[in-house]
Image (tube, helix red, strand yellow):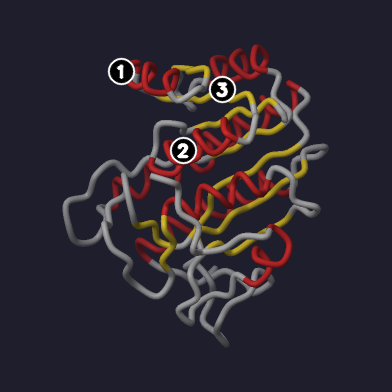
Amino acid sequence: MSRVFLAGAGGAVGARLVPLLVRAGHSVWGTTRSGSRAGALRSAGATPVVLDAFDRDAVARAMREARPEAVIHQLTDLGKVASGPVPEDVLRANARLREEGTRNLVDAAVASGARRFIAQSIAWMYAPGREPHGEDDPLDRDAKGAAAISLAGVLALERLTLDSRPLEGVVLRYGQLYGPGTWNTAQGGRVPVHVDAAAHAALLALDAPHGGIFNVAEEKGLVSSERARRLLGWSADFRLAP
């Protein structure tokens, strides 16, 4: 049992992760930008924390009060895109959150004495090369256009997560989410992952024997999730009980 600060507790992954953490016996402080979601978090067994991740002082204050042993970063800023490509301004907002929001969370985590920092990344930014990609394969630093915007945010998030001693950093490179609360009701693409399986990976990462990077996706040829299966005991088949 540990004290867990979950940033993005009201999001797609966060909403599925809260009950998993509570059932496992963890004390959970869950953030949301919307006061209207606080009641749902409280009903799920978490202590709600209403804040904006860009408010550095508010993040630091909340982390001091929670005194977590672990911080789980599931924040995104993508909103709802009806169809087609994600607009550039939305991608830029999400990349900014991955950089500035992550920095605020990491600094607060270090100051509060947390030992582990777990962050959501993405599994489809690898450079072209032999597939399936493992975690040691390079990311596509030659990306252009929309991909370059996303890559900049990913690089900042992963660097902050992995290089902020004394935190033990864990990066979960999620596939494209599908399932309840996501954009997609059904599996699709070459790197899908059900939102419940994604949430379960974050729970397992709390007690992982090793930090580092883990691909967390169903294996459709683009990436290998062998490391997550071997070191986390993760399965893409995990689903929350009804």
Q: Position of residue 195 (x, y in %)?
A: 42, 52
- Marked residue nearer the N-terminal end (3 or 1): 3
| Residue, disc 3 | 29
- The amino acid type of the residue labelled 1 equals Ser
Looking at the rendered image, the quarter that the N terminus falls into is: top right
Q: Secondary structure at mark 2?
A: helix
Mark 3 is surrounded, within 10 Å at the Cα level, by few (under 14), some (14 to 19) or many (20 or more) other residues, namely many
Residue 152: numbered disc: none
Between the residue at mark 2 and the residue at mark 1, the CA separation in whole angstroms equals 16 Å
- 189 vs 73, left or right, is left
Determine crowd level at label 2: few under 14, some 14-19, many 20+ residues with C-alpha closer than 10 A. many
- The tag earlier along the polypeptide, 2 or 3, is 2
Secondary structure under the numbered disc 3 in the rendered image: strand
Which circle's residue, 2 or 1, is located before the other in the chain? 2
What residue lies at 69% left-to-right and 42% top-to-bottom?
206
Disc 1 designates what residue? 36
Tell me the amino acid under the disc marked 2.
Gly
